[in-house]
Amino acid sequence: MSPSSVQDLSGSRLRIFLFMAWRNLWRYPVRSLLTVCALSGGLAMVIFNASLMTGMTRQMVVYATEVSTGHIQVHRQAFADDQDLYATLPWPWLEAIEADFPQLHVAPRLYAAGLASTTETSTGVMIRAVDAERERAVTRMLGQVRQGEVALGVIDETEQGIARYGVAVGAQLARNMRLAPGDELVLVTQAADGSIGNALFVVTAVLNPMELNFDRMGVVMSLEAYRQLMFLEEGFHELAILLDDLDQLEAIQMALQDKLALLEQQTPLDEWGGPVQVRNWKELNPAVSEMLAVSNSMTLIIGLIIVALASLGMLNTMLMAVHERTREFGILMAIGMKKHWLLVMVLLEALCLSLLSAVIGALLGSWLGLRMEDTGIDFSDMMPDGYDWGGIIFEPVMKGWLEPSHVLYASLMMIVVALLASLIPSWRSIRLKPVEAMR
């Protein structure tokens, strides 16, 4: 017999056994349907969980970068360690970075500690000065408004002709000090020249919670208002940077380090401020970074557990099928069927069940994942101000994100695990002896 004839015969047998396997499944339709429900339900839960985990990690990345931190930050060592007021970077460096890296969005910031007072109360605050136009290109901080409208320029003048600037405050600070847009706020601090800096400001906006410390103590003002309050002209404390392509994070970070090293050679910095540090968001928020690192492993482990439990239904179904058809298998072997074809027939039954379950489960899981993208799970009744993780406050609406690769991998995992579970009854079927099986 020629090789092509052998192949045609094998293919014909395989088609016959596939037809028989499909027919055999529906000898006991209730049992088969229960198995399909268990497998497809388990697969749908795996896809739903993967969608939820992916959406949560994407949400964490967005809040850890685009809301207030940026993808990369540049500081002096002394400022990163102790918030040293005098550990600044020269203003010409900002122009040099913008000229050499036109693809980046950069925003300088200045910081100080101070005392905020109203007619009723006072508390310590953390002052953050920003360039409003550049800041809006880098983060969403000035767009996270709960009350009012962010206006950091000159609002009006006092009777003595002194300009009053607008400021935005954190939500918890506003709650503690009973502040609302339009209220006056006095800031007192020690200026860079050693004098006591003080000024009267107008609250123009209350910001949504973004960072835990900033929400309790944060006051945002313009760079011009900061200079008048602090008398600090030499430079800026922090440079926040946003990338258009996050895949270039490490490459851009290394290029920035080389550029800043060259600038430091051309314009040496003072010694007490320490070296310049270029850190990405993963280094700035290690808790979030570690959570992202384990999320894929968690998704895989949870998926395997769910699918393995659901596959117990497959194991039970196939064991019952083999047990009930012991006499049938004995007759087939007695009339000449090879044991490996018997094994193929049992495995094809398991494959048909798995494929049917995979289609139903993938459709159901994809529908649940897409619904999670649109609506999400709203925890705002329990956590109206969001929840804190690693010092960052996330919104209380947890949304999913469905990736086609997760649907494919989860379906393949379910089919493989189900087939592995069916190996036990399949192996039992080929160990039968025709004489004993026909009794």
Image (cartoon, helix red, strand yellow):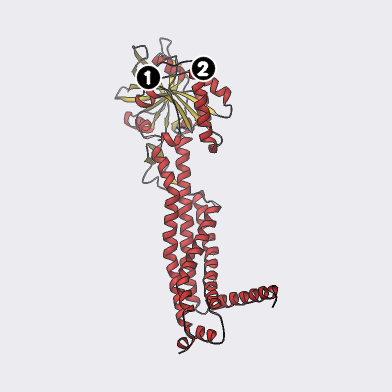
Q: Give the residue displayed 47% in from the left and 40% down from the top.
A: 61
Q: Give amino acid for label 2.
A: Pro
Q: Residue furthest top?
A: 160
**Nearer to us in this view, 187 or 241:** 241
Q: Is residue 400 visible?
A: yes
Residue placed under numbered mark 2 in the picture: 92
Q: Position of residue 226 (x, y in %)?
A: 42, 18
Q: Quadrant of the C terminus?
A: bottom left
Q: Position of residue 299 (x, y in %)?
A: 44, 53
Tell me if residue 287 comes above or below residue 411 in the rendering.
above
Q: Secondary structure at mark 1?
A: loop
Tell me if residue 17 comes above or below residue 67 in the rendering.
below
Q: Residue furthest bottom?
A: 439
Q: Mark 2 vs mark 1: which is more N-terminal?
A: 1
**Nearer to us in this view, 277 or 354:** 277
Side of 11 relative to 35 (left or right): right
Side of 330 relative to 384 (left or right): right
Tell me if residue 3 comes above or below residue 136 in the rendering.
below
Residue placed under numbered mark 1 in the picture: 85
Tell me if residue 72 comes above or below residue 90 in the rendering.
below
**Nearer to us in this view, 261 or 380:** 261
Q: Give the residue displayed 51% in from the left and 25% down from the top.
A: 258
Q: What label sits on residue 97 in the rendered view?
A: none
Q: Quadrant of the N terminus?
A: bottom right
Q: Position of residue 328 (x, y in %)?
A: 51, 85
Callout 1 crowding tier (Cα within 10 Å): few <14, some 14–19, many ≥20: some
Q: Is residue 208 visible?
A: no
